[in-house]
Image (tube, rainbow, N blue to C red):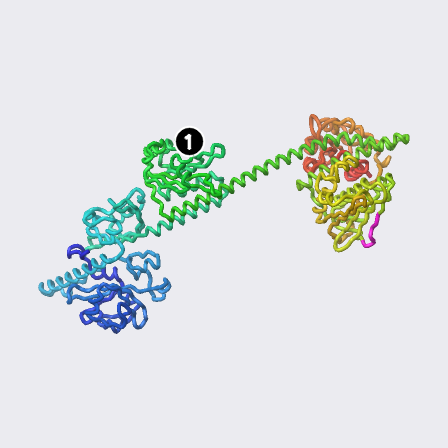
Amino acid sequence: MNPPDDDAVSLHGQQLERAFPFFIRWDEKFRVSGYGGSMHKICLDVKVGAAFDDLFFFERPAGDMEMAEGFLRSNENSLYLFRHKKTHQLFRAQLVLPSSAHEAGFFLASPWFNIPEQVAECGLTLSDFAVHDPIFDLLQLVQNHRGAVAELKSLADSLTSERTKLRLANKRLSEKEAESRTLALVAERTDNAVIVTDAAGCIEWVNEAFVQITGYELEEVAGRKPGSFLQGPLTDQNTVANIRESLANGKGLRTDILNYRKDGSSYWLSMEIQPMFNEDGSLRNFMAVERDVTRVKEEERRRWIQHAVSSILASPLSSEQAGAKILQAVCPKLGGSLGLMWMLHPETNNLRCVETWHDPRMNVAGFLDVSLDREISIGSYLPGLVWESGDAIWVPDLGLYKECPRSTVAAGLGLHGAFAFPIVSNGRIIGIFELCGQHIMEPDEALSQVVTEIGFQVGQFVARRQAEDDLREAKEIAERANEAKSLFLATMSHEIRTPLNGILGFSDLLAETSLTRTQQEHLSTIRNSGDILLHIINDVLDYSRIESGAVKIEEIAFNPSALAEQCFAIQRQSAESKGLEILLDIDAGTPDSVMGDPARLRQVVMNLLANAIKFTGKGSVTLKIWAEDARLNFEVRDTGIGFDQVIMEQLFKPFQQADASTTREYGGTGLGLAICDRLLNLMNGGITAESEPGEGSVFRFYIPLSVPEKSAGEREDDGIFPARIPSKVNAEGRTILIAEDNAVNARLMKILLGNLGYRVLHAENGLEILNLFKKEQEAVTIFMDVRMPVMDGTEAVRRLRAGECGERGKILPVIALTASVLPADQKACIDAGMNHYLAKPFRPPQLLAVLKDAGVLD
């Protein structure tokens, strides 16, 4: 394009320097006649009159060449590289030669930097560069343009003649015309679009870069305002308002804006608008320099979408909630006004809309009506087409689908474009994201890749949430099943323990009377049967508690030798009744005191001794205890039936016995060894077994050996209870109240406590016991059953502690007497205000122990 005529643009020297702060100009002898202010910051020796060759040397187009008219003319269109001799700073430059030999030539130069840090090293700032300088691409920054129109030099002498004034004015006019031609030539050669408008904002001139970017020729836009044909539906109206306000006030502006080309495609511009003023200060023109930043904006948009989606998927949302958030984030960024999330329904295997988002300024009720109540099959409508193809689909005009009722409704709402992409999990499409809007921009390859990745991310998220939901549901089902099991076990235990308490209790009482030999044998059978039944119940409950993690291991000091002797004494009668020899071997090095849980350890020893006696027909059973290698070791050896290797592998699994014949001959639940194994594991110990069929068995187990530092007055647990209840104690004149709805158990308690010398009064429910205590304020304790009609035991105790029966009721010892033996039952009793706990069925030693603990037995 040819330079504009003289009247097209009129610019003066300072504007040239502002546009090219590193320019350098020479006269016909190639001496410096002018230079930009920024040039002098780097090259301090540059001054008017200095020879160009004394200051610089050329590296391109030909090294070591000197300034000469022929050299410059022959390389007029080349890119020049010259270096400052003192600082070695390299400059790249465009040569501008005058149309007349009497005018100066100059270089439009710019320093060459490889890294941004070199700018500061040279003492420069961004204000030293022009807005169109390529250094802006290197630094990726925007420079505030310093604009100010210098005042014209006043005339040298107002008293000179009119001829002198005219000569000076003509000279200055000639200079301005030359500068205007130079600036116009530069504007033609830059890659940035340049627009010059009049004071009203109507276009007067554009450069070739503007034509290349927008597709509009000067003849098509001259006299028009740029916004009237460059702005489109997605152009931000706030930005437009700011531009109009600045132009109206005659001020400059920097901003980014989305514009549209002649072919309708959109692009982003980084734009700087500056006003130009006449000598009298009146506004004459606006000049805009615009740089295409579409790629930068598109990359920013892609990164923003990726970050937004990643943040949403990292939050604790459900699949539908996350889908709604993604629609809300992504839709506006792609020009959408409405978004829908479709998911495959597991029963119909069709797509159903599960979440929507829309611009709150739009009324989309009609479109949602035809979407929410519809199922879409593969290949139908836009979501179905994406499902069928497996790829994202962009539709510029929904009107192409005239047979689709959704398209008809969408067109009525002004929703013309649409974009949809699949949600993929494990290689299978499980849903679709669909975006609709007035102008959905066609995604480029990079954006298509981003939404594809979003589809995979959401698919993984949905699969993970589904797995979590399935796991949560399975956990809830398991917990409900466990609760049902616990409730069943608690109920079963309670209903069996209550009558069993009467059986064992009255058996113990009957054993204290005079009986014939035959009666004693029958009574022994009854007592043994009751003990076996109690053992079975306890095994089932213990195993259930261990499996549910309800068993807590204590860590207290106890005497292991005393514990072994107690177990030996209890099992001795059973062994001798079968004609077996039972032996106890306690190593002399066994410590007198160790740390552990004596109750649980006793349970293991008793179980193994009982098994050894049960499965041994003749011979002996031996219990051995010793300390070695930081372990407290136990061994139970018998000469019984033994077992083979196949049984060995199943030995410590629940409900396992040798075979069906073993179960028929010896009975049992098959839980004893499983309980021993679990308890020892809880105590950080272990158990092993050795056996051969017919050769007997050896069970060895251990717990870690920890010897306590015994302090003065510390009590050790030896676990020894009195074998029989004494006939009388010092209880004369003391009254004990019993709340028990079972007549058999009430009678048993009256006899046992009466034999001790207590006065015993009975009530059948909680309400009766409260009324009874109001009359018997001297009672020393209350045995309180938990499950009773009218009012249960826990409610009765709460009222007692609340003072309903006076101050005495707040401090009276209350002993829970119940067949509910689960830890939760015990905790409920304590939480209600009971002090002690006695489980049914109980034996006389346990009754004595709880009376002592309650402080009512001397």
For the residue marked with disc 1, what is the amino acid?
A: Arg
Residue 328, image x, y percentages:
41, 41
Q: Which residue is mark 1?
A: 374
Question: Does residue 320 sit above or below 280 in this rendering?
Answer: above
Q: Quadrant of the C terminus?
A: top right
Foreground residue, 616 or 754?
616
Residue 585 highlighted magenta (yes or no): yes
Residue drawn at (35%, 47%), measured in percent from left and top?
444
The answer to whether 196 is drawn above or below residue 100 in the figure is: above
Q: Is residue 829 left or right of residue 76?
A: right
The answer, for residue 676, to whether it is visible in the render is no
What secondary structure is marked by label 1? Answer: loop
Q: Which residues are magenta?
A: 584-589
Relative image position of residue 691 (x, y in whole percent): 78, 46
Image quarter of residue 834? top right
What is the quadrant of residue 434 in the picture? Answer: top left
Q: Residue 669 appears in which quarter of the rendering?
A: top right
How many numbered marks, from 0 up? 1
Relative to 450, say whether 189 is above or below.
Answer: below
Viewer-nearest residue: 547 or 771 = 547
**Residue 609 percent location from the top left of the image:** 80, 43
Residue 665, horizontal then vertical, whole percent = 79, 36
Report whether 200 appears left or right of 348.
left
Residue occupying the point 27% across, 56% down: 191
Name the quadrant of the N terminus: bottom left
- Looking at this rendering, what residue extends furthest in the bottom direction? 54
Categorize mark 1 by other alpha carbons within 10 Å: few (<14), some (14-19), many (20+).
few
Out of 163 and 78, give the one closest to the viewer. Answer: 78
Residue drawn at x 30%, y 44% as measured from the top left: 235
